[in-house]
Image (cartoon, coloured by chain):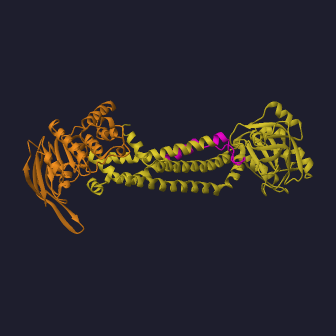
Chain colours: A orange, B yellow
Amino acid sequence: MALVEIREVHKSFERETERVDIFTGLSLDIEQGSFTALMGPSGSGKSTLLNMIAGLDRPTRGVIRVGNAEVSSMSSAQLAGWRSQHVGFVFQQFNLLPVLTAFQNVELPLLLTRLSKTERGERVKIALGVVGLQDRMHHYPRQLSGGQEQRTAIARAIVADPTLVLLDEPTGQLDAKSSQEVLNLLTRLNEEFGKTILVVTHDAHAAERAKRVLHLDKGTLLEREEALP
Amino acid sequence: MKFFPLLLANLGRHKRRTILTMLSVALAMFLFASLRTVVTTLQRTGEFGGANRLVSMSASGFMVFLPVSYANRLQAIPGVDKVTWANWFGGRYGDGKRFFANFAVDADSYLAMYPEMSVPADQKEAFLRDRSGALIGARLLDVFGWRVGQNVTLIGTGYPGDWTLTIRGVYTPTDPAISDDALMFHWDLLDERSGRRGDAGWYILQIDNPGNAATVARAVDDMFRSSSAPTKTGTEQAFNASFATMWGNVSLLMNTIGMAVVFAILLVTANAMMMSARERTSEIAVLKTIGFTDGRLFVLTMLEAGLITVTGAVLGLGAAKLLYKASNFNAMGFLPGFDVTTSTLLLGAAIALVLMLASGIMPALRAARLPVVQALRTVE
């Protein structure tokens, strides 16, 4: 069953006086519980596609549906509410708030819920436990390694138990060891917790972990290979 | 409340800048409260005056004397209950750096007409009995370290010579508009020693019915219109107001400076808020990605501005209220009862609110309208 349905999506923008077409009729299904890697050269539209699925950007034309929500036609406020419940987003540069501890960073999405402080605390501890950082919860980002920061960002992405986890170059800033830790974590989230994962990456190791690898080039999507078992 | 730690964390990001901005607001509010209190004190002083008291002075001005013989004639005017008079002495004490009002009064009738000046009965009696006695405001005890029974020497300016007086009593005003920073002594002594016999500076008349004030004042002025020393009579309130209106331009100046200070601080605060918001472009984008709505980010940014301005306002207004109260400030008697009023505090709070809105609106709108993809692209 497709969790994400992308139908005939067009996306273009103006660069100075020139109109640049990123997608012209892109269609794609992403199955629930899948682990998909999206690869491609810089400027091919990977991040734009990720942003449109997350409702951070809008297609010029076409339909994007995630679950029962037609993301492409929702208002800004509706999208914000929907994202807080259904999407976890991880950035290449971690993007933790430097003035908050790991615990407080992970708690941020839960501030938008009706959970009590105690309930929020329990959930944060669980999420930090999943990423193996329960002993670092009171550390500030500057006191964490790159890998730990990214794992904290992943904990923030999953703490609200979203349907879909989107990652934009999650290992782009990490050394090999930290990259492996993050990839192991993503595999576990997918296999053990059943999370649907879509990761934009240049990293071949990251792509190896995915069950499905898509290659995007000049707005065209190619199914490169079927995932390894 | 659950967003409060986030607000505090953001304010703590640049502690020095936040503290300096808060102190700027506090200073602005302190100055505003101080300047406005000058205005309100002057206004209240101008409004002071018993409804049943008239002041009669020379039609040529405050510094021109009237004959003391007018007293009996004034007393005879229908509607006049009591009459007293006083002369400005204008002496200085010591090096004269500390000014205080000092004047000669017809002691018995003067104290009878001013129940707002509370004097212990034994001290009042002692003052009335001693022709070289003086009655002083309670503040002067602290200012000069004087005590009852002490001799003090005033150096006359309008009335040359050394004038040694014995402090016989201390008065405490029951109305804050009356200065507690003055010295009074017997007009008889002044009359006798000055060599200018029979001069009265101004008369104060107590009338039986405040409703007759205009009639009585007209009767007084009509009585002396053709004399060599015509009078100008009005209510005590008008008399005091005439002094206050001498400060008219000062009031305008005070209000103008106060608003200029607030406006300058508005720019400082707005600039600090804008800098803070600009530095956090990526974080705002992240919060939007997480699910924070534009409206929520608008409110959070406004609340940040609010925390700065409210804290600054509480510090500044609170300091003004407490400091002037604790120090019993009265500008050497020129501003008796100098106290930050509730209306000033409320106006200060309203200005703080405007300051919050004005300084927070731009960064808040910026946060709310920030295109998240563009912001993320800037970061990435």
Judge by depth and name the residue closer to the eye, A98 or A149. A149
Does the image show residue B351?
Answer: no
Can you name the residue that lies furthest to the bottom here? Answer: A17
Q: Residue at x 52, y 45 (%)?
A: B313
Pick the front one: B132 or B78: B132
Q: Is residue A85 left or right of residue B130?
A: left
B103 within the magenta span: no
- Residue at image point 19% right, 66% down: A19
B147 above or below B304? above
Give left or right: position of A177 versus B171: left
Image: magenta residue range? B324-351
Where residue B161 sits in the image (x, y, percent)? 90, 52
As rendered, which of A227 and B43 lies closer to the eye?
A227
Image quadrant assignment for residue B185: top right
Residue B102 in picture, x, y percent from top left: 80, 47
Point out the image quarter for the N terminus of chain B: top left
